[in-house]
Amino acid sequence: MLIRLFVYGSLALIAAGAIAVIGRPTFPLVACVIASVLALPAVFMRIWRSHWIAAGAVVTGVSTRRKKNPEGKDIIIFEFHYSYIVSGTQYTGAGECEIDVPRYQEEDAVAQLSDSYKIGDRISIYYAPTAPSLSATTRGARLPEVIGGIVLLLLLVMCGYLFYRAIRR
């Protein structure tokens, strides 16, 4: 998430710089707006989660699968499923961890996570008070994500201003 935020932020910054240098708001403006729009929902979702309510859940299943990361490297995804009760209604959710270690360490990493998430274990989760079916195993945004969101908003405003200036020429 944080890497994606920095990539989109960098794209928006490059686009804003190109608009300022070129003075013509064509592709750079579009790139800036797209980058900002793609990154902002993730940032605001994390900020919204900071108000979610803590609850206890029970692990109901675990599994692993392989997938390729954006660089084409094989990684293992460790998935765990859980159930929790809110106001007498049972809900389910899932979490996952990416295991990106050298191949000779994969077995140990999976074993360590399997020890942490055994079927029947109780874990802490967070759910949305207005929609209890939405849950996560982490709450809230970290400071870099909040700062990144603010920077993206400022870049979007700056692109709008540069676009306005370019049109007025």
Image (spheres, rainbow, N blue to C red):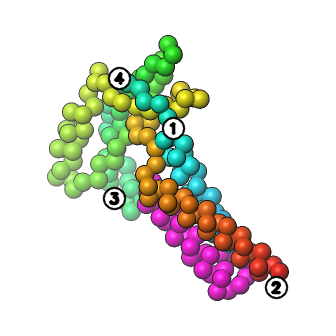
From the viewer's perspective, is the residue at label 3 or at label 2 nearer? 2
Say which of marks 4 and 3 sits in front.
4
Q: Is residue 22 found inside the magenta-colored segment of the image?
A: yes
Tag 2 and tag 4, C-beta contact below 8 Å: no
Crowd band around label 3 with a 10 angstrom C-alpha radius: few (<14), some (14–19), many (20+)? few
Residue indicated by mark 1: 51
Tell me the distance, in whole angstroms, between the alpha carbons under discs 2 and 4.
62 Å
User: Where residue 113 appears, x then y in whole percent?
Assistant: 25, 38
Residue type indicated by callout 4: Val
Residue 117 in sight in this render: yes
- Contact between marks 3 and 2 (CB within 8 A): the answer is no
Circles 1 and 2, Cβ within 8 Å, touching? The answer is no
Q: Position of residue 36 (x, y in %)?
A: 60, 62
Label 1 sits on a secondary structure element that is: loop
In the rendered image, the residue lying farthest to the right is 168
Q: Residue at x 21, y 45 (%)?
A: 109
Q: Earlier in the sequence, mark 3 or mark 2?
A: 3
Under mark 1, the amino acid is: His
* Quarter of the rendering occupied by the C terminus: bottom right
The amino acid marked with disc number 2 is: Arg
Disc 1 versus disc 2: distance between alpha carbons?
46 Å
Q: Which residue is mark 3?
A: 73
Which of the two residues, 10 or 98, is positioned nearer the viewer here?
Answer: 10
Query: What span is colored magenta in the figure?
Result: 1-28
The residue pinned by badge 4 equals 58
Tag nearer the camera, 1 or 4: 1
Image position, residue 117 (x, y; %): 28, 31
The residue under label 2 is 169
Secondary structure mostly seen in the magenta stretch = helix
Which residue is rendered at x = 51% and y = 38% of the image?
51
